[in-house]
Image (spheres, rainbow, N blue to C red):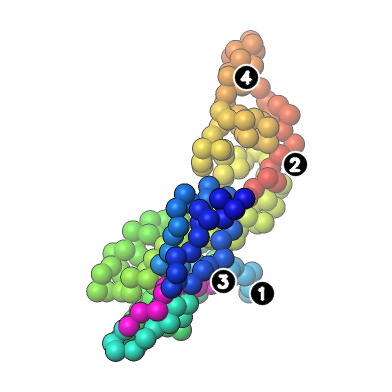
Amino acid sequence: ASDRAGACAILPGFHAAHVSMPLALPDCPRQPLHTRSIRVQSYARQDGLYDIEAELIDVKGYDFVKFGQTHPAGKPVHHMHLRLTIDADYNIVDAQAAYDAAPYGEHCTAIAPDYADLKGMNLLRQFRQAVKERFGRTAGCTHMTELAQVLPTAAVQTMAGRRRQQAQANPDQRPFQVGGCHALRTDGPVVREHYPRWYTGPEANAAAGSRPDGSAPADGAASTDSFIHTT
């Protein structure tokens, strides 16, 4: 145990950060340099719309001198917020940006009103490319633009409960997540177990081949419960 603790020791003169991760412990002492934290929270509004609020914080693990003054470890170098209001089809109907900290003060924060131009974009239709084209380089803030880029998948998670309800109401519609990643490939064990109707692996092909017309089996063992495993 002592050898493992020593493997991830913090070098003198640097501030230790809380470490909790499933990765293997480092095999040599390290010094913390930079921590970026991104947090996204979403809300259902009473008017039927949805708010997605994102926050980005950058801090250094050491003191440094900036413009003749010491910037202490742990004090944010960047701290910014972005709120998008979207409808059920992922259309952005309002956008607000704000800053708590920026390295060049008002010269950085002056760009905040420009991010209202996110209105009219759709989070699932070439959103990242549209953001890059509108806010690239000197047309925007590097870090605010980066924060915007994480929001499409957060929006998808925001709508998970709504999609469960839709799936229960329309069990003939294939769940959107099937085929969307390696774990949910249509010939894999997860789809075979939880979404058997949409399974396309060897067993499904064998079952189809055993039918006189060669068609796939009907609904198999699929049930309403099979469609609520949306993450």
Callout 4: SS: helix
The answer to whether the residues at label 3 and label 2 have Cβ atoms under 8 Å apart is no
- Of tags 3 and 1, the one toward the viewer is 3
Residue 67 in the image, given as x and y percentages of width and height = 28, 87
Q: Is disc 3 surrounded by few (<14), some (14 to 19) or many (20+) residues within 10 Å?
A: many
Is residue 99 visible to the viewer in this orientation of the structure? no
Position above or below: 163 against 104: above
Q: Amino acid at mark 1?
A: Gln
Residue 142 in the image, given as x and y percentages of width and height = 33, 70
Q: Earlier in the sequence, mark 3 or mark 2?
A: 3
The answer to whether the residues at label 3 and label 1 have Cβ atoms under 8 Å apart is no
Residue matched to label 1 = 46
Q: Earlier in the sequence, mark 2 or mark 1?
A: 1
- Of tags 2 and 1, the one toward the viewer is 2
Q: Nearer the viewer, residue 10 or 33?
A: 10
Q: Residue at x 68, y 25 (%)?
A: 218
Q: Residue furthest left?
A: 138
Q: Earlier in the sequence, mark 3 or mark 1?
A: 1
Q: Amino acid at mark 4?
A: Glu
Q: Earlier in the sequence, mark 1 or mark 4?
A: 1
Q: Amino acid at mark 3?
A: Asp
Residue matched to label 3 = 51
Q: Identify the magenta region.
A: 53-65
Instruction: State the CA–CA distance, disc 4 to disc 2.
Output: 21 Å
Q: Amino acid at mark 2?
A: Asp
The answer to whether the residues at label 2 and label 1 have Cβ atoms under 8 Å apart is no
58 inside magenta stretch: yes
Position above or below: 121 against 5: below
Q: Is residue 220 left or right of residue 33?
A: right
Q: Which mark is residue 225?
A: 2
Residue matched to label 4 = 203
61 inside magenta stretch: yes
